Amino acid sequence: DLLPADILGVSIYKREKDVFELHPGPIFSQVILADEVNRATPKTQSALLEGMAERQVTIENETHALPDPFFVMATQNPLDLVGTFPLPDSQLDRFLLSFALGYPDPVAERELLKAEDRSRLLERTGQLLMPADIRALQEDCDAIHVGDKLLDYVQALLKESRDERWFEAGLSPRAGLALLSASRAHAFLDGRDYVVPEDVKTIFPALARHRLTASTGFGQAPDEQIAELLDQVPVP
């Protein structure tokens, strides 16, 4: 039952001032969690589009910058699809990575059962990073070197994904840029100042899973097709 204005905000007329004042919605937060986003209507889903791509929103013909850093997470419930609205490809392409959580492994599940209530744990969780620290880490990731041969490899993966024998539609240039950014971050976390093909191969399934639709009659799950595609493209 959410409306776009519930996410973006709305201008309310103040009679004593004879002006409209913007009451910002939750999209003006630094971190947003859209829980079960596929239960929102397409119009409400589209309220996130501009913010996720441009880091700004337009409300009543006025552009408003969003906080920096700005980060959107979303969940989908794939089991009960009644009353849901699948996200269009243009919006899925704005999400960097996609993960299927599934059930926890026995060790993690035991820790979950033994641990204290998560809401109380959250109340005691302190701040670890300031916004300036996150921006500095992002700049460090942007400085990670990507060689020409690595770029050739990324382009080969993009080209292979666009072959109709794999998927109905291939990865977009936006996906290619996202693959490079995520690979740089993976290299940074691994303590290197350069990207290697293993970074790309590690990131690729999570980056491609939500962007690709299996070709009709292929007979395999998308993850299996993605794994085969990776095997088909030679590693430099």
Image: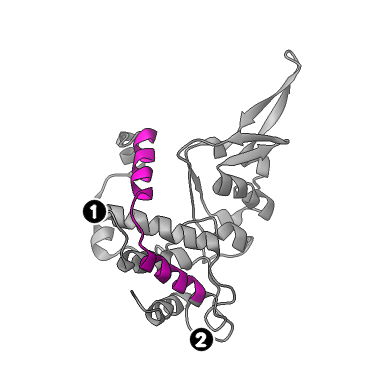
Can residue 213 be seen by looking at this rendering? Answer: yes
- Where is residue 225 shown, x and y percent of the image? 45, 79
Mark found first going from the N terminus, 2 or 1 = 1
Give the residue displayed 55% in from the left and 73% down from the top.
213
Kindly identify which residue carries mark 1: 191
Compare residues 29 and 103 and report the one nearer the observer.
29
Using the numbered discs, state the Cα–Cα distance from disc 2 to disc 1 in whole angstroms. 40 Å
Q: Indicate how the structure is coloured in the image.
A: one colour
SS class of the residue under badge 2?
loop
Compare residues 191 and 147 and report the one nearer the observer.
147
Q: Is residue 16 above or below residue 88?
A: above
First to last magenta residue range? 131-159
Give the residue displayed 32% in from the left and 34% down from the top.
127
SS class of the residue under badge 1?
loop
- Where is residue 187 shown, x and y percent of the image? 30, 57
Q: What residue type is labelled 2?
A: Gly
Q: What residue type is labelled 1?
A: Gly
- Where is residue 206 shown, x and y percent of the image? 42, 64
Quick one: which residue is furthest to the top in this view? Answer: 16
Image mark for residue 219: 2
- Residue 140 drawn in magenta: yes
